[in-house]
Image (cartoon, rainbow, N blue to C red):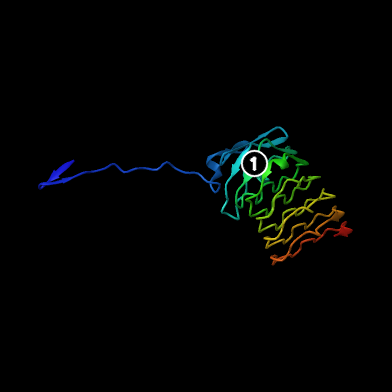
Amino acid sequence: VTCLAGISTTTQAATVSPPTTSLAQPQALADENGGQLGDVTWKIEGDTLTLSGGTLPNLGNSDYDYPWSHSGTPSSVTKVVIEGGLTLEGDSGQGLFKDLTHVTSIEGLDKLVTTNTTSMQNMFLRDYALTSIDLSAFHTENVTNMSDMFGEDHALTSLDVSQFETGKVESMDGMFDGDNNLTSLDVSNFDTSQVTDMGYMFDEDYELTTLD
């Protein structure tokens, strides 16, 4: 307390908030072999990329790349393992497994919680060696963007999307583009009433002989 000309004044120390982190700034929490996003821990050991359980928060950035994607993932990685329940909030499904070009299998897709997921854009894009994708536990009722979701997955010969709920989807642009070994696809239950873009949806699917 300071007295100036008979007036008492009180000076309070400024409160400094602790720094915050977000998915837009992952470099503070990650190196090339592991790190943390939200409360999800990821690590690369040998041939395996492991994701712990937890929640991936909304990205809020359409240009965001996960740190294990593309140049951050060594060519030795051939397998992804999801260890526990992994909740995808908002658009955090976007590009989740993108550019894992040497990965042949993803274990634990049934542990993904996608009820609140709004974007699956680029989710498995350019996973050239991936031979199968278990989508049986996927909930897609709130997804609005599926563009390039399975684009250029050259090793896929079959894909079961028959249970997808697509009533809110606005874009399916390039959804199966370049899946040139895919032989059959059942999209008979797709609700496309809100879709405004189907450009290149089945482009270069040369082996596709059945489309329901």
Residue 75: x, y in percent? 73, 40
The residue positioned 67% from the left and 53% from the top of the image is 120
Which residue is most to the top? Answer: 46
The answer to which quarter of the image holds residue 67 is top right
Is residue 37 or residue 164 the one in the foreground? Answer: 164
The residue positioned 77% from the left and 40% from the top of the image is 105
Quadrant in which the C terminus appears: bottom right
Amino acid at dot 1: Leu
Is residue 198 or residue 48 the one in the foreground? Answer: 198
* Residue for badge 1: 86
Q: Is residue 91 left or right of residue 201?
A: left
In the image, residue 67 above or below residue 63: above
The answer to which quarter of the image holds residue 189 is bottom right
Residue 113: x, y in percent? 66, 45
Q: Secondary structure at mark 1?
A: strand
The residue positioned 26% from the left and 42% from the top of the image is 12
Quadrant in which the N terminus appears: top left
